[in-house]
Amino acid sequence: MTAELKKIETKVGRGERLSPDDAMIMFESDDLLAIGELAASVNHRRNGDQVYFNVNRHINYTNICVNQCTFCAFHRKSEDQDGSYTLALQEIQQRAQQASESGATEIHMVGGLHPELPFDFYPQMLKTIKAADPALHIKAFTAVEIDYFAKLTNLPVSDLVSTLRQAGLDSLPGGGAEIFAPAVRQQICPEKISGERWLEIMETVHRIGLKTNATMLFGHIESFQDRVDHLTRLRDLQDRTGGFQAFIPLPFQPENSKLMNARGAGGVDSLKTLAISRLYLDNFRHLKAYWVMLGLKVAQVALCFGVNDLDGTVVEEKIGHEAGATSPQELGRAQLVALIRAAGKIAVERDTLYRTVRAG
Ligand code: V47
């Protein structure tokens, strides 16, 4: 181990917070195993050998979007474009019903910023899901959608979120964060809300009392410095609110996007980014390896690099798969349990708020 990594190891051992320079040293280091081992030890102290997963179902209600993010292969400009769709409330009801019958505890629902849907459609979707099964936890709408709805209704974010909460919204997923640094954002998602606005919305949502997640899209045109800046801003907000449950680094999938020539993230970069996230985000309890984007094998190995959550059964995934993800569409509960056990860990089915549903 280099002297610089040794210093970081000493800091971690003393429970001292790592600096942005420490994070840069780790991103620039080739010693993946030393960083991974350190992250695994921190995770073990915090979460033991338990690895969480949940039984969930994704619903992407529309792929029509006024934003044209260059990394995204999912969106369509308008109804006239090939492959565009918007789900009817009845289809949403059927999907929620199926999810409930197959033992799901969570619906993860996000979509494009549709230019024509009236605001009322969104609370209706939430009510439709709760009508299918009131016990389903609805984790829906990224901060980007929340901002869009606030503009649509002219409501302050806090009132808007309260309205959605009354209709059934239980928590928010972590999407739309991408990379906060403005120069990168300008190139990969010029129409999207700024990083500052994303953080401001999350802060408001946390203060209302709802939990959220946070993501970072990496392996495209961003620098290590941009990643460290992103992690630092998340850590600062978490210090203020404690409202983030899990951090989910998302490795960029380049196919069918306008960023097809960007490098994508390999296995080493993905594992190192996960491990550094565990070490740097000392105030995030949960670190999720999203198997859809990482692939099953890297996600499984990530359990030895500081990760304590494998996300869920998912069932129908569009955002990663339209961009070339080669993972399956769906994992069964038994498959998730087997993946976790084969890594020498204890599988625990959780609900969205990390309460144990069933061990093993
Ligand atoms: O916001 C879009 C990303 C996100 C690509 O909170 C891409 O529990 C890689 O946020 N390659 C949506 N990533 C997914 C997401 C998520 C997933 C699982 C769990 C949770 C959670 C959140 O996917 C988008 C964007 O950042 N994305 N296109 C792509 N080509």
Image: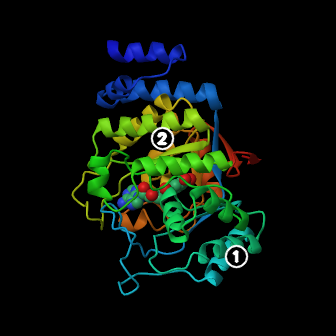
Measuring 56% from the left and 45% from the top, which residue is drawn there? 203
Return the x and y of residue 26 as percentages of the image width and height: 35, 27
- Foreground residue among 197 and 58: 197
Return the x and y of residue 53 as percentages of the image width and height: 63, 49
The answer to whether the beta carbon of the residue marked 2 is less than 8 Å from any atom of ligand 1 is no
Return the x and y of residue 198 as percentages of the image width and height: 47, 51
Per the rendering, the mark at residue 41 is none
Per the rendering, the mark at residue 301 is 2
- The amino acid on which the numbered mark 1 sits, given as a three-letter code, is Thr
The reply to whether residue 199 is in sight is yes
Q: Earlier in the sequence, mark 2 or mark 1?
A: 1
| In the image, farthest residue toward the bottom | 80
Instruction: Name the image quarter holding the N terminus.
Output: top left
Graded by Cα atoms within 10 Å as few (under 14), some (14 to 19) or many (20 or more), the crowding at tag 1 reads many
Task: Reply above or below: 116 against 152.
Answer: below
Q: Secondary structure at mark 2?
A: helix
Spatial separation of the CA atoms under disc 2 and disc 1: 38 Å
Task: Reply above or below: 223 against 145.
Answer: above
Mark 1 lies on residue: 128
- The amino acid on which the numbered mark 2 sits, given as a three-letter code, is Val
Return the x and y of residue 163 as percentages of the image width and height: 67, 65
- Foreground residue among 220 and 187: 187
- Foreground residue among 278 and 227: 227
Tag nearer the camera, 2 or 1: 1
